[in-house]
Amino acid sequence: MQHAAPADRRTLAAIGRGAANHDPPAEANDPAPQELRLEALIDSSPLALVEFALDTRIRLWNPAAERIFGWTRAEMLGRADLPMAPPHLRAEADDLFHRVAAGESVNDLETFRLHKDGRLIPVSIAAAPVREASGRVVGNMVAYTDITERKAQAAEVHRLNAELHVRLEELAASRSRIVAAGDVERRRLERNLHDGAQQRLVSLALSLRIALAKLDADPQVARTLLQGAGEELTLALDELRELARGLHPAVLSDHGLRAAVEMLAGRAPVPVEIAAVPDARLPEPVEAAAYYLIAEALTNVAKYARASTVRVQVVARDGNLEVEVADDGAGGADPAAGSGLRGLADRVEALGGTLEIVSPAGAGTTLRAAIPYAP
């Protein structure tokens, strides 16, 4: 162990006398054992312990101070003018020094001090006056705690909180859009049912009542009415099936995602290359999200892209279903310009996934989604 210089020993003895609150043991008649124990304690302390004389000269510099600030003890003993104080914090350091020299103690002051290489080290400072037996202040003892890791953890917590706040705001906005889209879709279904199948069923009921009334008096008319009622019933069933197909395609429910994508590709006015689609069945919400993503992308290609080909790829990898639809069209797609792409993002994000749209002007559009699922 590196021993203190004679000036340090006098300081240590003074600290020991100032800190004593009970009768000393028998060996206290010889100050050397007390000084050695206190010296060992200071040398093994994880805190950077630095004592300044009243003229700011450094009189004590322990191994932790070497480790935290980079200067060796030989470089710092006797050095004056508060060398660890950064220029922009010099006024703060001077004020702290004078407060302690006047007899004040300071605890938990978070600030920065210089490393030998010029880096700023975030530290927490505890400082107290060193007194002689008479009570006169003869020095300034400062303990520095390196709080770099704590600051980094606090910054990470702050970043995560900010990210969580943004995510919560996005989630609230997404839920609002989903509710609004649900209201619009419900009104559309009500209108389609009222104008289509419901009117046909009302007409069918009227035809059946008339046919019943004519059954005995004019069987031929009754037969004609019943034939017409059967045709109306067929048309009503066809309309209901079409509505149900719009809600959730039967081919997706019955045969899975590959068959549903093949059906979409067959209906598309632009040639579609299906690079890959899993044969295995996936969780229903995941299949539905992938299906509607591809369906909306193909619809947008047909309406806006002026593309000559589209490539669809669906891959199950690392717990995600990765969906990509790429065309060679005009590009320039803007999710903020319409509700279609934003609605797809809401659908994907509701499942904990992400949607990326890359659409440089003149270079086509690529939609990439990653939807997590448990295999």
Image: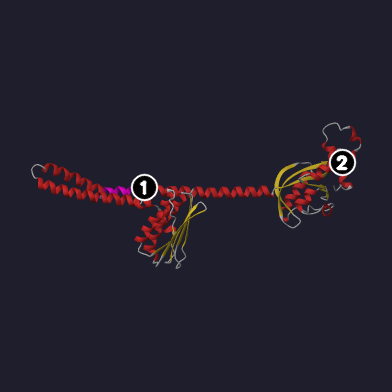
Q: Residues within 10 Å of mark 2 (few under 14, many from 20)?
A: many
Q: Which residues are magenta?
A: 181-195
Looking at this view, name the residue that lies furthest to the right.
30
Please tell me the numbered disc located at residue 92: none
Helix, strand or loop at label 1? It is helix
Helix, strand or loop at label 2? It is helix
Q: Nearer the viewer, residue 366 or 229?
A: 229
Q: In this rendering, is residue 364 above or below 16?
A: below
User: In the visual, does 141 lie left or right of 193?
Assistant: right
Which quadrant holds residue 22?
Answer: top right
Residue that carries the numbered disc 1 in the rendered image: 183
Q: In this rendering, is residue 158 above or below 265?
A: above
Say which residue appears at 86% left-offset and 44% top-offset: 11
Q: Is 340 in the magenta?
A: no
Q: Nearer the viewer, residue 85 or 214?
A: 214
Looking at this view, name the residue that lies furthest to the front.
279
Looking at this view, name the residue that lies furthest to the top.
23
Residue that carries the numbered disc 2 in the rendered image: 35
Q: Nearer the viewer, residue 350 or 275?
A: 275
Residue 4 percent location from the top left of the image: 86, 47
User: In the visual, does 176 lie left or right of 126?
Assistant: left
Q: Residues within 10 Å of mark 1 (few under 14, many from 20)?
A: few
Q: Is 186 in the magenta?
A: yes
Q: Amino acid at mark 2?
A: Glu
Per the model, the C-alpha gap separating discs 2 and 1 is 82 Å
Residue 235 percent location from the top left of the image: 23, 51
Residue 298 percent location from the top left of the image: 39, 60
- Please identify the dominant SS of the magenta region: helix
Q: Amino acid at mark 1?
A: Asp
